[in-house]
Image: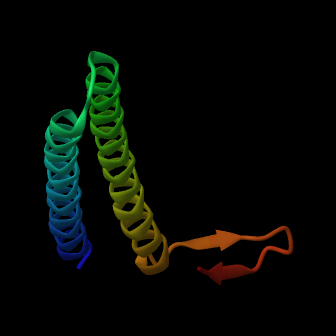
């Protein structure tokens, strides 16, 4: 049962990672398209440079959001597999009173 939960967790993590990657790709594409629009509307080189910097900032932000999502997904998977391992282990502990208790 543990192996099944781990496999399901891995599949969920990969799906969430793929979604985060797709979202980051979309955000980067939107930033590039917006830069092109802003450059077409620009009246001087300063406005064009600002548009380029805005694009680079948005792309970096999208990449950071993707990395945070990957970390969150990995932590979520780890928490789920660790929690289920603890819950279903059937381990017993000995208390100071000498009595055994199941987890």
Depth check, front residue: 71 or 94? 71
Q: Quadrant of residue 57?
A: top left
Question: x%, y% of residue 101?
Answer: 67, 82
Whether residue 29 is situated above or below residue 36 in the rendered picture = below
Query: Which residue lies most toward the top here?
Result: 45
Instruction: Depth check: give the residue in front, 37 or 101.
Output: 37
Q: Residue at x 51, y 73 (%)?
A: 91
Q: Position of residue 3 (x, y in %)?
A: 19, 69
The mark total stands at: 0
Task: Depth check: give the residue in front, 53 or 59.
Answer: 53
* Quarter that holds the C terminus: bottom right
Q: Position of residue 25 (x, y in %)?
A: 15, 49
Residue at image coords 32%, 26% = 47
Residue 92 in which image quadrant: bottom right
Residue plotted at (23% across, 79% down): 1
The residue sitting at 85% across, 67% down in the picture is 96
The colour scheme used here is rainbow
Seen in the image, is 28 located left or right of residue 60? left
- Up-down: is 71 above or below 12? above
Seen as rendered, the residue at the extreme right is: 97
Looking at the image, is 34 positioned above or below residue 83? Answer: above
Q: Position of residue 2 (x, y in %)?
A: 26, 73
């Amino acid at each position: 049962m543990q192996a099944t939960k781990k496999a399901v967790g891995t599949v969920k993590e990969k799906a969430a990672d793929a979604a985060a990657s797709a979202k980051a790709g979309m955000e980067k594409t939107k930033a590039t398209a917006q830069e092109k629009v802003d450059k077409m509307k620009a009246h001087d080189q300063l406005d064009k440079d600002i548009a380029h910097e805005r694009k680079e900032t948005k792309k970096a932000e999208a990449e950071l959001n993707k990395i945070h999502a990957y970390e969150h997904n990995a932590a979520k998977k780890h928490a789920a597999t660790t929690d289920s391992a603890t819950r279903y282990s059937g381990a017993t502990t000995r208390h100071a009173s000498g009595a055994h208790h199941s987890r």
